[in-house]
Amino acid sequence: MKMKNLWLVVLLCGIGCSLYVGMSFYQDVALKNEKKIDGLVMKVENDAFYLETANQSIYKIKKNNQSISLGQTVEIIYEGEFWPTNLEQDIVITKVTTQEKRTLETLYNQEFAKAQELLNKMSLDEKIAQLLLVRYPESGGDTLLKEKNFGGYIFFARDFKNKTKENVINEIANLQSVAKVSILTAVDEEGGTVVRVSSNPLLRSEPFLSSQELYKQGGFALIKEDVNEKSALLKELGLNLNLAPVVDVSTNESDYMYKRSLGADSSLTSTYAKTVIEASQGLGVTYALKHFPGYGNNADTHIGSSVDTRTLESLKKVDLPPFAAGIQAGADAVLVSHNVVNAVDGQNPASLSASIHNLLRNTLNFKGIVITDDLVMGAITEVPNASLKAFLAGNNLLITTDYEKSMQEIREAITSGEVAREYLDQKVLVLLAFKYKMGLIK
């Protein structure tokens, strides 16, 4: 049988005796005519890999007893045809390679060199801290940032209450001045029921309108104007990441997400996603599509767990198209919900699921920054090691309040050898390159 080489990159995993891992395969140049394997999720047991492909075929591949640290890049040699026959094969792990740029699926190739140089100077804790988008504390935010060097802060309405533009501009400028690495400054400025900045009349005379109201009053032309005005205000204040737009498809007024959505079908919502992302380009504020893979009619995950029972066919037909449209329009960030999506992974909230991230990365071909929803929300608070699971599922940024717990979980996994440092370096490298692309790091 002909010998074939594949580059195997272990990207994502969970915790427990069976580890769920998302995979990306990079075929050797000599194999360019072979079928590409995509849409993979892998469960690792003592003696085998279990690979589930995009067409839901499951393959069991026996392995030898060599140790593999999660996150390492390994070269494997296998015999026989992998697709679609020979469901059980022996493989030999020949070596563990060093990190290569080609293993990073990212939009930021031009920023790699600068990001790598900066990464090489960072301590373990500094790298871990970059993964965290921390809720801005009521006091001492600058002192804490100087000590911890977080990837960024997320601000809520309380953080702007009764402050003038000058107050906010100076406060955020001070944060950037003490940061060892320039930070992301994030808000949920959706419009309508979720407004952080424009809830303060000193910052805007009235709150931004919801997407539904904008569309009703002036269609997509008015939505473009809203993006321009919103971006200008956020940039003026020093805010550089808007966790919007909401591109969940909801047409039922009783749905929890209805008022925050466009309230329209999948096709119209897809146009909305495309419109917002295209309009935001070059305005100095990055927008994040949310809440992947689509909220639908599910319950509020702020207060407890929510299980999505819709079929995979329904998700692909209704919920994924708006995300696909936004991604094709150039979206740099996607925020993942805490819903348990039975059709993809019935065991884990989407934000902690390698399968969900695999759907985003491989099916929708998203190469940007993936962000968790807030890890303090009710759907997550009872999950053990939620921050570590979120990191291993594939997120680049973890929204968290308990930053010490988040850092400890990830630090212990790295220092114990459970997770390869290379995996951490991959995530941080992409994040730093993202910041360079945004123009945050000079």
Image (cartoon, rainbow, N blue to C red):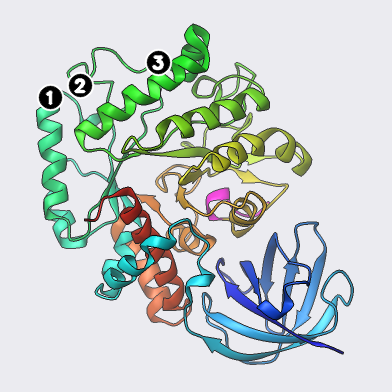
Q: In the visual, does 191 lie left or right of 353? A: left
The earlier-in-sequence mark between 1 and 3 is: 1
The correct choice, above or below, for 224 with respect to 351 in the image is above
Q: Amino acid at mark 2?
A: Leu
Foreground residue among 280 and 374 = 280
Evaluate if marks 2 and 1 touch, with contact meaning CB atoms under 8 Å apart: yes
Dot 3: what SS? loop
Residue beneath disc 3: 209
Residue beneath disc 1: 164
CA gap between label 2 and label 1 equals: 6 Å
Q: Which mark is residue 203?
A: 2
Point out residue 280 in the picture as x, y percentages from the top left corner: 40, 33
The earlier-in-sequence mark between 2 and 3 is: 2
Evaluate if marks 2 and 3 touch, with contact meaning CB atoms under 8 Å apart: no
* Figure quadrant of the C terminus: bottom left
- Residue range in magenta is 346-352
User: How many labels sit on residues?
Assistant: 3
Residue 145 placement: quadrant: bottom left
Q: Amino acid at mark 3?
A: Leu
Residues packed near mark 1 inside 10 Å, few (<14), some (14 to 19) or many (20 plus): some
Evaluate if marks 1 and 3 touch, with contact meaning CB atoms under 8 Å apart: no
Residues packed near mark 3 inside 10 Å, few (<14), some (14 to 19) or many (20 plus): some
State yes or no: residue 350 in magenta.
Answer: yes
Asked whether the viewer can see residue 356, the reply is: yes
Point out residue 223 in the picture as x, y percentages from the top left corner: 45, 19
Q: Amino acid at mark 1?
A: Thr
Dot 2: what SS? loop
Dot 1: what SS? loop
CA gap between label 2 and label 3 equals: 15 Å
State yes or no: residue 70 in magenta.
Answer: no
Point out residue 30 in the picture as x, y percentages from the top left corner: 71, 80
